[in-house]
Image (tube, rainbow, N blue to C red):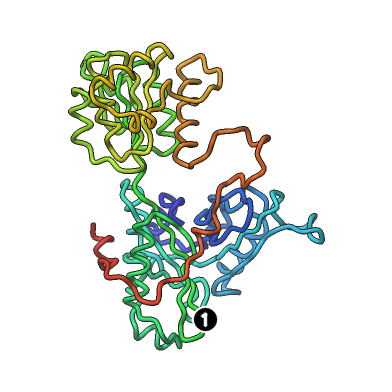
């Protein structure tokens, strides 16, 4: 649902009723990951997609049943095999599970979606399997009419799991940034929730307000990055040149990076060609727990840069993290093509892929989804903060 945050928040604000279909599980290769959603409003208008077009018609019918009251919730599993190759299915050969639930004010609160729109981390969870009275119950903080409690669980016949344990486990999953099914053993029965998490956008920091930076900033923004551009030259570092970025900063590059709150999702791209700024900047960047450090330049520039970094005390282990010359060998000739080359390498590095043509590989196209997307909650919940603390944060 979170990918449709703008649409859902707007409809809730207008008091509308609608149905949301969400991919809750994927087996094999599929065009969309868990969390992909499609919304159908009372007038039959559609927003979003669960399969890229393969099964939308069948899912639309499930949404209509929920909207008409013919069903409280709906579930569907869509795949393809020898017998159903020409029926509704996924042409890519995988299988997806879809859960359809009604939504309206009083059933779904706007806070999780407003957090996404504000650029903050957010999460929402829905009971997709278990006692009928609980199906479709939204249990994440600020996402439903009231927190799930032990009394509601007992009234539905749930035994062996407490509301506190459910909240703690969902809190852990939401903070991890992973979406998927969470299963609870309830004295022989099973309660299954689909937990959807969306972390704040990953950060891409560009150093050097050059023409390549303009193209890279625009392309990275399209990929959902929170982009910053930093350069010590005020004449070149203006918001007018970088309309797509979140922050344009006139600072000494290494000083700015030292003050940033970086993490394993942060990408650092050094596009300038000035050793007096690049060397201390790269030395610092290579010491930080960031996802990617790349530097623009020719092979000759790279060799000289590596020599100077060694002279500055950067060891060989750190230097192996430096992506230089930056980008993949795509034959890029323009700033826009170079931006594609750089971001293609960033995607591959962050995903742990080797950036080979798909025609030369035989593994899953969309990455390993299954293992991380299905978890059984541990028997005893670790002490973590209450979920409402995240909602308030």
Give the answer, above or below, for where 189 lies relative to 280. Answer: below
Give the answer, above or below, for where 136 lies relative to 367. Answer: below
Give the answer, above or below, for where 364 lies relative to 105. Answer: above
In the rendering, at what x and y percent does residue 52 appear? 62, 47
**Mark 1 crowdedness (10 Å alpha carbons): few <14, some 14-19, many ≥20:** some
Based on the displayed image, in which of its 4 quarters is residue 137 positioned?
Answer: bottom left
Q: Which residue is mark 1?
A: 132
Single out the residue that lies furthest toward the top. 300
Query: Residue 42, can we see it?
Result: no
Residue in the foreground of this view, choosing between 320 and 266: 320
Q: Residue at x 39, y 57 (%)?
A: 14
Based on the displayed image, in which of its 4 quarters is residue 323 positioned?
Answer: top left
Give the answer, above or below, for where 119 lies relative to 74. Answer: above
Q: In this rendering, would 132 be left or right of 143?
A: right
Query: Residue 259, can we see it?
Result: yes
Residue in the foreground of this view, choosing between 347 and 284: 284
| Element class at badge 1 | helix
Q: Residue at x 55, y 51 (%)?
A: 368
In the rendering, at what x and y percent does residue 131 appear? 50, 82
Based on the displayed image, in which of its 4 quarters is residue 282 positioned?
Answer: top left
In the rendering, at what x and y percent does residue 139 appear? 38, 70
In the rendering, at what x and y percent does residue 27 appear? 62, 58
Q: In this rendering, would 353 be left or right of 246?
A: right
How many marks the image carries: the answer is 1
Quadrant of the rendering where the C terminus is positioned: bottom left
């Amino acid at each position: 649902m979170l990918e449709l945050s703008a649409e859902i928040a707007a409809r809730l604000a207008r008091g509308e009723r609608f149905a949301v279909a969400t991919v809750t599980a994927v087996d094999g290769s599929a065009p969309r990951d868990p969390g992909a959603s499609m919304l159908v409003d009372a007038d039959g208008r559609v927003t979003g997609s669960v399969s890229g077009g393969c099964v939308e018609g069948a899912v639309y019918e499930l949404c209509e049943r929920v909207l008409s009251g013919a069903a409280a919730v709906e579930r569907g599993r869509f795949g393809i095999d020898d017998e159903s190759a020409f029926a509704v299915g996924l042409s890519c050969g995988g299988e997806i599970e879809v859960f359809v639930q009604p939504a309206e004010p009083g059933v779904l609160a706007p806070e999780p979606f407003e957090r996404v729109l504000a650029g903050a981390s957010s999460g929402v969870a829905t009971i997709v399997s278990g006692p009928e009275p609980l199906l479709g119950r939204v249990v994440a903080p600020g996402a439903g009419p009231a927190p799930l409690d032990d009394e509601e669980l007992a009234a539905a016949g749930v035994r062996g799991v407490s509301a506190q344990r459910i909240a703690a486990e969902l809190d852990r999953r939401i903070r991890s940034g992973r979406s998927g099914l969470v299963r609870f053993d309830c004295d022989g029965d099973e309660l299954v929730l689909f937990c959807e998490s969306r972390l704040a956008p990953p950060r891409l920091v560009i150093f050097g307000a050059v023409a390549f930076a303009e193209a890279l900033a625009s392309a990275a923004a399209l990929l959902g990055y929170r982009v910053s551009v930093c350069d010590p030259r005020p004449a070149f570092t203006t918001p007018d040149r970088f309309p797509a970025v979140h922050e344009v900063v006139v600072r000494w590059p290494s000083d700015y990076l030292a003050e940033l709150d970086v993490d394993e999702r942060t990408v650092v791209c050094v596009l300038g060609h000035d050793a007096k700024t690049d060397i201390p900047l790269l030395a610092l960047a290579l010491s930080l727990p960031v996802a990617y450090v790349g530097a623009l330049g020719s092979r000759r520039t790279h060799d000289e840069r590596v020599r100077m970094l060694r002279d500055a005390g950067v060891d060989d282990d750190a230097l192996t993290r430096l992506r230089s010359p930056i980008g993949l060998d795509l034959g890029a000739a323009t700033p826009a093509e170079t931006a594609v080359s750089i971001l293609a390498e960033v995607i591959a590095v962050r995903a742990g892929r080797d950036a080979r043509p798909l025609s030369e590989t035989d593994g899953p196209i969309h990455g390993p989804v299954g293992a991380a997307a299905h978890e059984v909650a541990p028997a005893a919940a670790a002490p973590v903060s209450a979920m409402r603390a995240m909602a308030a944060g």
